[in-house]
Structures are given as C-alpha cells and as structure tokens.
Image (cartoon, rainbow, N blue to C red):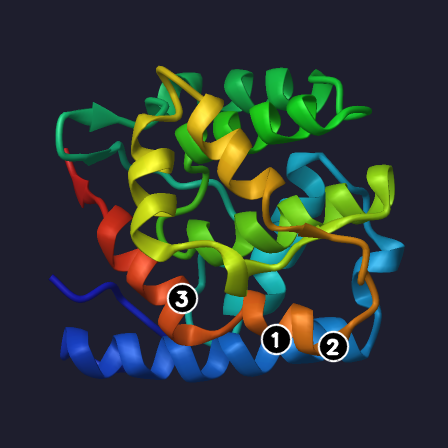
C-alpha cells in the first residue's frame, strides 16, 4: 500500500522514485547550507530535524514519531508504546568513543522512529556524530552493501560485525563533498532502504 504523500502519488514505484530524487536533493542542500552545524549531534531531536528536512516536501509525518508498529521479517522495531522511552535512553547513551557511537546507531536503527525514511536519516546522523566527536566520517563507498545490510540485520544481537565494517571505512576527510555525496547516493541508500522496509503489524 502506498503511503499518503503530499505529491498525491498512488503508485509505489513512482513514489519511491520521487522520494529518492527529492530527498537526495535535500540531503545535498543540508550539506551545502551547513545546517547540521546548528543542530545537536547524537540526539533524537537532531535526527528528527534531519528527517524533517529530507522528507518535508513528501510526507506530513516528516520529523514526527511514527504511530504504527513496524517489523522487518521476524524482528520487531520498538513498539509505539515504548518508543519515546527508547529514544530518551538513546539520547543518554555515551558517544565519546567509536564503539559507543556505533552502539548508539544500532539502538536508533532498532527504535526505527519514523514511518518511512529511517535509513538515510540515520546514516547522516551517524556521520554527524562521528564528525563532531572523533573528526571522522564513514566513506560509504568503501562499505560493501550486502555486508552492511547483513551486519545491520544482526546488529541488535551482535554488533561486532557492523563495528568492524564501518571502522575499516572511516576517513578523516570530514569536509570532503565527494565523500558526503557517496553517503547520499541513491543506489546505496535505497538498496539498504528497500531491504529494511517494514510493514505494519
């Protein structure tokens, strides 16, 4: 079923294409206008601002907590009734060291706070934290897509794989536009997005 959207698109493939095009353009604007510099790194508030900016032209729920329960396969994301508590916990998690930051990222993925568009928003959020705390970002072009998806799928139980995978792709080129562009590349993000796309319970 196609989500209700501001574009009045009723066909899912068409909506996916429009979402890809618009959110990628907005992600570029986010970088070029240096908007992240004014937002808080490592909090749900910061993530919500990223999500709102990327998707506000497409969905009314941009930047807002989901109000439906979601699952991927046998894995259920945080139930709506516990979602706010989960996000408060994530806000309070430490983020001074690399392992702490990835653990926070894994927890945010498990929370899955938005109805749609969690993947791209959360990866920008992750790089934002890494940049602020460690002066590093992930060069997503060096991360194998399939390995990443499998590692993220297993991360709630065993996060060592995702930690190793991302650590091997870290770079200190934190202000490199090309590195940022790799991170918002549609083929990378939307392969991941589709693999993790969830249905209502």
Residue marked by disc 2: 177
Q: Quadrant for the N terminus, please.
A: bottom left
Residue 63 visible (yes or no): no
- Residue sitting at 64 percent across and 36 percent down? 44
Residue 2 visible (yes or no): yes
For label 1, the crowd category at 10 Å Cα-Cα, with few meaning under 14, some 14 to 19 and many 20 or more, is: some
Residue 154 position within the rendered picture, expressed as x and y whole percent measured from the top left: 31, 26
Residue 30 picture quarter? bottom right
Residue marked by disc 1: 181
For label 3, the crowd category at 10 Å Cα-Cα, with few meaning under 14, some 14 to 19 and many 20 or more, is: some
Q: Are marks 2 and 1 in contact (CB under 8 Å)?
A: yes
Quick check: 150 left or right of 102? left
For label 2, the crowd category at 10 Å Cα-Cα, with few meaning under 14, some 14 to 19 and many 20 or more, is: few
Q: Quadrant for the C terminus, please.
A: top left
Of the numbered discs 2 and 3, the one sitting upstream in the chain is 2
Residue 96 position within the rendered picture, expressed as x and y whole percent measured from the top left: 82, 24
- Residue sitting at 27 percent across and 67 percent down? 4
Q: Is residue 14 above or below residue 43?
A: below
Q: Nearer the viewer, residue 27 or 199?
A: 27
Of the numbered discs 1 and 3, the one sitting upstream in the chain is 1
């Amino acid at each position: 079923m196609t989500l209700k959207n501001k574009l009045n698109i009723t066909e899912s493939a068409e909506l996916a294409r429009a979402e890809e095009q618009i959110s990628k353009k907005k992600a570029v604007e986010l970088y070029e206008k240096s908007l992240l510099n004014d937002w808080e790194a490592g909090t749900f508030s910061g993530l919500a601002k990223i999500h709102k900016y990327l998707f506000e032209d497409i969905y009314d729920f941009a930047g807002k907590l989901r109000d439906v329960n979601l699952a991927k396969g046998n894995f259920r994301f945080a139930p709506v009734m516990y979602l706010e508590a989960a996000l408060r916990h994530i806000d309070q998690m430490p983020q001074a060291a690399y392992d702490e930051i990835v653990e926070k990222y894994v927890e945010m993925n498990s929370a899955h706070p938005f109805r749609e568009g969690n993947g791209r928003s959360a990866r920008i959020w992750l790089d934002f934290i890494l940049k602020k705390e460690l002066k590093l970002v992930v060069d997503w072009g060096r991360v194998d897509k399939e390995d990443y998806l499998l590692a993220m799928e297993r991360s709630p139980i065993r996060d060592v794989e995702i930690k190793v995978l991302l650590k091997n792709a870290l770079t200190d080129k934190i202000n490199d536009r090309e590195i940022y562009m790799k991170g918002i590349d549609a083929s990378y993000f939307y392969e991941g997005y589709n693999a993790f796309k969830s249905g209502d319970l």
